[in-house]
Image (spheres, rainbow, N blue to C red):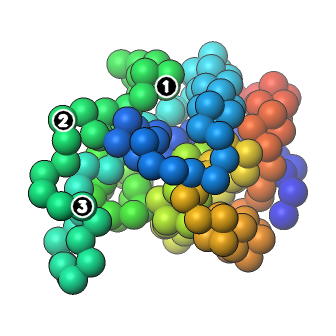
Amino acid sequence: MALTTLDPNTALIVVDLQKGILGFPLIHPVDRIVDRTRALLVAFRDRGLPVVLVNVADVAPGRTERPRHNGPLPDGWADFIPELDQQSGDIVVTKRTWGAFASTDLESRLKALGVTQVVITGVATGTGVESTARQAYEHGFHVTLALDAMTDASSEAHEYSIKHVFPKLGETGTAQDVIDLLATTSA
């Protein structure tokens, strides 16, 4: 569904734009994803709206037949990229699963702030972004996805999420569409 509206108290959730993940090969140029995300960060911060920076520090306990990495993660792997310009007022969520809501306090923190809608960007479209969007939807948030501010290592996963999953979870548009709507939304 095309982007039509933003609630007055909408939060931006940036998924896994961190040093270790952005070192992987991705299907879209990372600098474009980062630039669009930075524009969204500026727009949300300028309006005093909540910003959530999510990183992944490891994997959830459970099945181990397909480990994602060998041994401990390198130093700095989970650090946010400097371009996000992390602020003291940002909500930081460190996850160990694909989605930002599972096994974290993100839902309660957003609801305590009166947030009713989330805009989601980041990496990877078919895992971290999609899982976070599904969980946000299941927790009752209105979901918006800035499609040009996300990417994946797999073009198939990226396209499947955009074409088949995201339209069922909420509205989609570009980062600029979100910024334009923010300019007309009153708090």
Q: Which residue is mark 3?
A: 69
Asked where in the image residue 44 lies, by quadrant, the reply is top right
Residue 107 x/y as whole percent:
41, 54
Q: Secondary structure at mark 1?
A: helix
Q: Are marks 1 and 3 in contact (CB under 8 Å)?
A: no
**Disc 2 residue crowd, few under 14, some 14–19, many 20+, Cα 10 Å:** few
Position of the N terminus, as image quadrant, is bottom right
**Disc 1 residue crowd, few under 14, some 14–19, many 20+, Cα 10 Å:** some
Q: Which of pointers 1 and 3 lies earlier in the amino acid sequence?
A: 3
Q: Secondary structure at mark 2?
A: loop
The total number of labels drawn is 3
Distance CA(mark 2)–CA(mark 3): 14 Å
Residue at (32, 50) in percent of width and height: 56
**Disc 3 residue crowd, few under 14, some 14–19, many 20+, Cα 10 Å:** few
Distance CA(mark 1)–CA(mark 3): 25 Å
Observer-side mark, 1 or 3, equals 3
Q: Amino acid at mark 2?
A: Asp
Residue 150 x/y as whole percent:
63, 48
Q: Which mark is residue 84?
A: 1
Q: Secondary structure at mark 3?
A: loop
Nearer-the-camera pick, 94 or 114: 94
Vertical arrangement, residue 126 with respect to residue 29, above or below: below
Asked where in the image residue 104 lies, by quadrant, the reply is bottom left
Residue at (25, 49) in percent of width and height: 57
Q: Is residue 135 left or right of residue 47?
A: left
Q: Which residue is mark 2?
A: 75
Vertical arrangement, residue 178 with respect to residue 94, above or below: above
Observer-side mark, 2 or 1, equals 2
Q: Which of pointers 2 and 1 lies earlier in the amino acid sequence?
A: 2
Q: Amino acid at mark 1?
A: Leu
Residue 33 x/y as whole percent:
64, 38
Q: Which mark is residue 180?
A: none
